[in-house]
Amino acid sequence: MKVGSWASCNTCGFNVRLFFIACSNLPLFSPLTSQSPASSYWGIDVSFQYGDAKTTIQPVTAGILDSGTTLLYVTSDVYKTIQNMTGAVLDNDTGLLKVTKTQFADMKSLYIVTGGVSHLDFRFCPFTTLPSQITMELISDALSMPPSSVNASSDDVYLIFGDLGDMPSTGVGFILGYFVHPRFSISYDSENKRVGLASTEYTSRRVNNPSG
């Protein structure tokens, strides 16, 4: 989610470099969704993409952010697509998807792309170009659960996905639960009806299954 441009002042030297670094991790704000029932919560419109080719596996739909929910819940169609793309199978003992360590080593990032950007304060970032959307990258490690949180075989890697069911029956396309939140700085602005999203030092850190 870094934004910025060097082109408008490429001879300014060190000061511009400081500007760029300072602005690169400022939050971008996504407007809250107007789609019900997600609009009754902290809901935003996003699409999901997977892999280096950023293949769209979920078109733009409304869902919610909820740190009180543990998993990253997706609709049944997306859940099955993730199984097909990763080789994951359901572990009946835990109710979680799991992959072998070999499969985990081949897993790619999941990209959560917002439908729009509502604001960035240009008073503090005069050389910044506002992007048309926000992209949150969840690396493979972020898609896995820490082994200590799963009382199961250490030979497999367990994933953070949950099956939400069919969207027509729930009216919600996804829930970004607890395991997503520590990877980003997320701020809630009820007055302006928006959610701020920014990368942190933990966004790309491998801490859950570092050998993957």
Image (spheres, grey):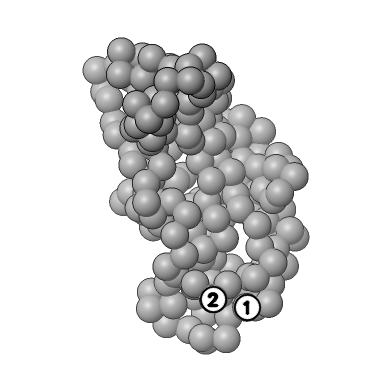
Q: Nearer the viewer, residue 183 or 126?
A: 126
Asked if marks 1 and 2 touch (Cβ < 8 Å), the reply is: yes
Mark 1–mark 2 Cα distance, whole angstroms, equals: 9 Å
Query: Residue 98: where, in percent of width, then height?
Result: 59, 72
- For disc 2, the neighbor class at 10 Å (few under 14, some 14 to 19, many from 20) is few
Residue pointed to by mark 2: 211
Vertical arrangement, residue 59 with respect to residue 181, above or below:
above
Residue pointed to by mark 1: 101
Specify whether 162 is left or right of 56: left
Query: Residue 119: where, in percent of width, then height?
Result: 39, 17
Q: How many marks?
A: 2
Amino acid beneath label 2: Ser
Q: Residue at x 33, y 38 (%)?
A: 186
Q: Residue at x 69, y 72 (%)?
A: 103
- Quarter of the figure with the C terminus: bottom right
Q: Looking at this rendering, what residue extends furthest in the left direction? A: 191
Q: Secondary structure at mark 1?
A: helix
Q: Residue at x 61, y 41 (%)?
A: 48
Tell me if I can see residue 24 in this picture: yes
Tell me if I can see residue 34 in this picture: no
